[in-house]
Structure formats: structure tokens, C-alpha cells
Amino acid sequence: MASNEDDPHGGVPAASDRPAFIPLEANPELMTSLLHKLGLSNSLQIHDVYSLTDPDMLAFIPRPALALLMVFPVSASYESARLAEDSLLEDYAGKGPQEPVLWFRQTIRNACGLMGLLHAAVNGPARQLVEGGSTLDNIIKDATPLDPIARARVLETSADLANAHKSAATQGDTMAPAATDDVDLHYVCFVKTEDGGLWELDGSRKGPLKRGQLEKDEDVLSQTALTLGPLKFLERGGGDLRFSCVALASSFD
């Protein structure tokens, strides 16, 4: 999905002036390969989630699941719900290590998939499994002390990030669209932080959104997290069921 309005937050360049990435296919193997190339431990991988309501299907995912990514087509009902909620919020200006999550504003066109993977890998327990000196590690160190506008520039100017993403995006099962094409698929990430907070992370929003509090033994695929997070998300979006999900969890190997 192209990043949202030309200047919804202030300080963000017009869409025509932003870098553009080839859209990333929602392919678990491809996503896993990209995360490993960026520096996430091989002990984690992306898994398909075939149902949010069937316990037998959810049982296929290793637990705890560290992050859940939803992929869905942007609809009029979703946009209406997003704009209504954002109208009540201030632009996020958090920075520094004391913040509960590391959130990135999306200024790169068609980088929704990458943003979702970044939010999954640099927050919660997954951050402890980022290899020192890797691209992800450098992004975390460079971006943490910065405000959201400056953080976005860290991503825009990272050649290692751009090269890794391009390599992955051109290896999907389907022909990749051009970086400048308008794509209506969007990604949203849900993570659980060390203090039990359930966060919705989406670079097209005004900032990170805390959706609730989880118990110590509850992960992002627990009934509480699903009710507060993706199921409530679908309800706000008008109940459109055209979506898919993947989760970040332990590798099978």
C-alpha cells in the first residue's frame, strides 16, 4: 500500500518525493528469509496463521507467538474507521529507550510489509534475538533516540535495508508489481511488550496504539489478545473477512 495522505502528520514529504519499494508478498518463507538477512536469529520464523478462531488451527503455531501480522485490502469502511479514530489522537512524538515500543512512521511507498516485519522484529522479546552489528541492530540503535520524522529518514537512507528488501520482494511466487504501482494491500502488526501491553503498530497511523493488557502466560494468539487486537480490528473495519495472517514464533528446525 502506498503510504497514506500526502502530508497527514506534518514534516513528511509529498508521495512523489518519497522512496518507493517493490511491494512484499505475504509469503512466510520469503518474509523469514528477509528477517534473517536483516539480522533476526534463525531461531525465529514466520508462520501462516490459518484461523483466528479455530483452536485446532492455532495449535499449529509454536508458542509463544511474538507478533501477529494481518494483511488485508484497504476498504472504504477501514479507511473511515481509521480516520475517525485518528481524528481523536495527537501525533506521536515519543523517542528514547523509555518508550514501550519502537514505532516507525511509514514514508516509503509500498513498504507496508516491511514495516510490519520491522515492528515485529524490533519490539517485545524478538528484539533480544537480533544479532549484534546487523542491519536490524543498527536501525534499533540509530532510531531509538530519534523522533518519528527522523526515524523515518533512518529507514529511507538505509542502503542495507533497501537492498535486502529488493532481493526478497523480487523472489515471490507471483510477479512483483513495480515499486511505483498503487497497491491496496496493507499490513498491521500486533506485538506484546515485556510489560504485557498489546500494541497495534502501523506506520500509516498517528502513532502506536495500545489495545489492552495481557497476562504473563498470554501471547498475541491468546483469546484475550485476539479479542482485543485483530478481531476488534476487523469489527472496526466493518467485518470485511478478506484478510490473511502470519505470526512470528520459534522455528520448526
Image: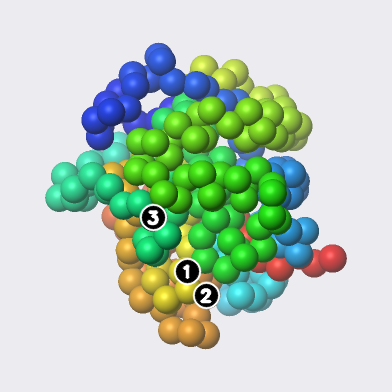
User: Quarter-wise, where is residue 59 in the image?
Assistant: bottom right
Residue 224 visible in the picture: no
Report the Cα–Cα distance between label 1 and label 3.
19 Å
Residue at disc 2, secondary structure: loop
Report the Cα–Cα distance between label 3 and label 2.
25 Å
Residue at disc 3, secondary structure: loop
In the displayed structure, 5 sits above or below 142; it is above
Residue of label 1: 192
Q: Amino acid at mark 2?
A: Asp
In this view, the residue farthest toward the left is: 88
Residue of label 2: 219
Across and down, in percent, residue 181 comes to 51, 19
Q: Which one is in front, 72 or 108?
A: 108
User: Quarter-wise, where is residue 107 in the image?
Assistant: top left
Q: Amino acid at mark 1?
A: Lys
Q: Which badge, 3 or 2, is on the more N-terminal residue?
A: 3
